[in-house]
Amino acid sequence: MNIKKVKINQLKEWEKNPRKINNKELNRLIKQIKMLGVYKPLIVCEDNKKEQYIVLGGNIRLRALKKLNYKEIEVSIVEAKTEKEKLQYNLSDNDRVGFYVKNEVIDILNGIEEFDIEDFAIDIEKSVDLNTLLMENEKKENISSDSKNLKELYNILVECKDESEQKECFNLLKKGGYKCRLLIL
């Protein structure tokens, strides 16, 4: 891992960053940084054309740090030459692996005095994988309020014995012109 301290003005947000934030949430993040400090580096790749770094993970933190007048920050420099690699780092940095169990969080909070609950927000008991997101979007696109224009979806599930057979089947279907997605269930 290549960790380096760089000047904030050498960092620029990834223009395709799919994460957004409203002012209320940004102010909550600023409050957290004031309270806890910066405890993890931003994930960046080099922008060789401009001698700058593109932030792949931590774009919203970068905005907060600028508002807090930080001059330097630690970054973790990764190699991401393609848009695919940039998206992979972005999604990985923001991935919600695991989840909070509601009752356990409540039990912990009830045992702590003077905890400002307005400073934090969490995901409870559900995360959405990208395949589900795409399938839900596809269904929405294919369903019209005008029943005459409803499109039917036809899906097929192919069970493969292992990953290599799955890849082979996927490639054959793609070559045949079929729209495909890989699933691991």
Image (cartoon, helix red, strand yellow):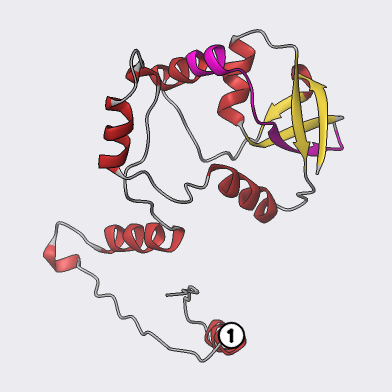
**Relative side of 163 to 96, left or right:** right
Nearer-the-camera pick, 32 or 112: 112
Q: Give the residue type at disc 1.
A: Lys
Q: Which quarter of the rendered picture does the N terminus lie within?
A: top right
Label 1 sits on residue? 175
Q: Which residue is drawn at 56% across and 18% down?
A: 36
- Identify whether 115 is placed above or below 164: above
Q: Is residue 126 magenta?
A: no
- Identify whether 177 is placed above or below 101: below
Q: What stretch is highlighted in magenta?
A: 31-49
Q: How far across and how far down the image is residue 53, in percent?
A: 78, 32
Q: How far across and how far down the image is residue 7, in percent?
A: 80, 18
**Relative side of 150 to 181, left or right:** left
Q: Residue at x 69, y 11 (%)?
A: 70
Nearer-the-camera pick, 108 or 97: 108
Q: Which quarter of the rendered picture does the C terminus lie within?
A: bottom left
Q: How far across and how far down the image is residue 150, in percent?
A: 20, 68
Q: Is residue 36 magenta?
A: yes
**Relative side of 151 to 148, left or right:** right
